[in-house]
Amino acid sequence: EVQLEESGGGVVRPGGSLRLSCAASGFTFEEYGMSWVRQAPGRGLEWVSGISKYGGGGGYLDSVKGRFTISRDNAKKSLYLQMNIVRAEDTALYYCARWHRNTFDFWGQGTLVTVSS
Amino acid sequence: DIQLTQSPSSLSASVGDRVTIACRASDTINDYLNWYQYTPGRAPKLLIFAASNLQGGVPSRFSGSGSGTDFALTISGLQPEDFATYYCQQSLSVPWTFGQGTKVEIK
C-alpha cells in the first residue's frame, strides 16, 4: 500500500525557516517524481514545487522561487521542502504527492504550517 | 500560466442525483486534465486522468469528458460519500495548476 506521511509543520514567525519532510513507503520511491501541494485556509489547491525521480529539474511556483528548496533522499525514501523567509501567505496545509503519468496519483494527509508573529 | 475556471463554485444535490461540474482552461490543454476529490481530514484522491480515464478503484458513477479547453466531471447517482470538493488540474505545463474547486453539498 502506497503511503506518504508528512511532518515538520508548525508555527513559524514571518521571515523564519521550516523544513518539511515526507516519508514514503509501499512503492519504489526512486522511480517517481514527487511534488509539494498546499491549501491555504479557505482557498483551493496550489502546486508549490516538484522534483524528478533523479533529484534534478525542480520546478517552483513563482511566489516561492528563491525562498523554498525541494530535495529528496532516495536512500531514505524521503522528500523535503526547505522553507526560508516565510510569509503570512505561506500559511497552509502542505501535502506531499507522487507524480505518475502526469497526475498526482497518491497524496499524504498533510502537515500544517502557520506563519504568525 | 494556464488558468482553470470551475463552475459552479458550489452546488446542492440529493443522494441519487446526477451532477456535472465544468472546468474551462485559459488555453488549449488537449486532454491533459485530471480530476480530484477532496474531503477535509483525508488525502486528496485522484478520480479521472487524461480527461476521461477512470483511475483504478474509483466507482464507475464518476466519468470525465472534454478536450481542448472545456471539460466536465459527471457523477451519475450521487452517494453519501461523494459530498466533497472537486478540483480539476492541468498537467500540460508547469506550473501545474488547479481550478478553484467545486463543493458538492447535501440538499
Image (tube, grey):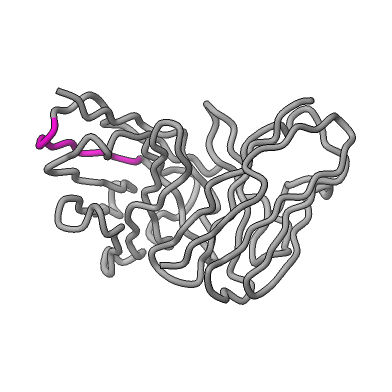
Query: Does B34 sit above or below residue A15?
Result: below
Asked if the magenta segment contains residue B61, the reply would be: no
Asked if the magenta segment contains residue A21, the reply would be: yes
Residue A55 is situated, as x and y percent measured from the top left of the image, at 27, 63
Question: Is residue A5 left or right of A67 when viewed as pictured?
Answer: right
State the image quarter where residue B32 is shown.
Answer: bottom right
The range drawn in magenta is A14-22
At 55% from the left and 53% from the top, the residue drawn is: A105
Relative depth, front residue between A86 and A101: A86
State the image quarter where residue B44 is shown.
Answer: top right
Residue A12 is situated, as x and y percent measured from the top left of the image, at 17, 28
Which quarter of the rendering shows the C terminus of chain A? top left
Residue A2 is situated, as x and y percent measured from the top left of the image, at 52, 44
Question: Is residue B11 left or right of A54 when viewed as pictured?
Answer: right
Residue B15 is situated, as x and y percent measured from the top left of the image, at 86, 30
Question: Is residue A21 left or right of B47 when viewed as pictured?
Answer: left
At 67% from the left and 67% from the top, the residue drawn is: B70
At 13% from the left and 37% from the top, the residue drawn is: A17
At 20% from the left and 53% from the top, the residue drawn is: A69
Query: Does A93 sit above or below residue B47?
Result: above
Which quarter of the rendering shows the N terminus of chain A? top right
State the image quarter where residue A88 is shown.
Answer: top left
Query: Does B96 sit above or below residue B31?
Result: above
Question: Tag count in the figure?
Answer: 0
Relative depth, front residue between A19 and B5: B5
